[in-house]
Image (cartoon, grey):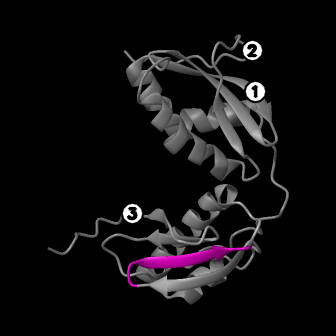
Amino acid sequence: MTPIDDGRILLHAERTATADTLRWVLPGRTPPPAGRLRALLAGVPEIVRVESLADGFLLTKRSGASWRPLGTVIDDAIRAAVRWHRDGEHPEPLPAFDEPADPPTIDGVRAVIAESIGALLASHGGEIEVVEVAPDRIGLALHGACSGCPGSTGTVDDVLATALRRRYPTLRDVTVVRGARRLWPLPARRGR
């Protein structure tokens, strides 16, 4: 059965035998030519090789570079390359990866939380408090229904941390701090 293309671009990364190479898979989709992705990643010196596969791409990073900060940049570039190929939508060039980025601020982190998981927090009666903000790390405390919820780890790691790294490319760590004092509370939005 052929998958229906509803416009969503499904994408995930898989490890390979070499730590410096990841396989980026586009399930049910023929990837665009590697040249389009190379063009979009031209400003990212950490990526040294881009190859097309039948179901995605093989990307190799410079030895010593970390995949963590590159992940969201690569994800954005692959999605842009697919839209470019599929819709003819020519993307804006990605900024050079080593350009200085604005450091995280309490208001900026709050805005990302509200945009990425605000509705989920409100619907579950939870609250996320920002307890530490530094150029390379953010500390969060979970309160209400989020405190002790088995799904909160996945939400913070998979959804919120990804959104924060997109906004702040220099960010290395997003951690949940246990027993934190209330420094900057982020009130939960309660819907009625």
Is residue 7 placed above or below 153 in the rendered structure? Answer: below
Q: Residues within 10 Å of mark 2 (few under 14, many from 20)?
A: few
Vertically, is 7 above or below 68?
below
Name the mark on residue 10: 3
Earlier residue among tags 1 and 2:
1
- Residue visible at 64% across and 70% down? 20
For the record, the magenta segment spans 54-62
Magenta stretch: dominant SS? strand
Q: Which residue is mark 1?
A: 132
How far from the left and from the top, in percent, is residue 106? 74, 30
Q: Is residue 92 visible?
A: yes
**Callout 2 secondary element:** loop
- Residue matched to label 2: 183
Residue 89 lies, with reference to residue 64, above or below; the image says below
Residue type at tag 2: Leu
Which SS class for mark 3? loop
Q: Callout 1: few (<14), some (14-19), or many (20+) C-alpha neighbours within 10 Å?
A: some
Q: Position of residue 83 (x, y in %)?
A: 46, 74
Q: Is residue 49 left or right of residue 27?
A: right
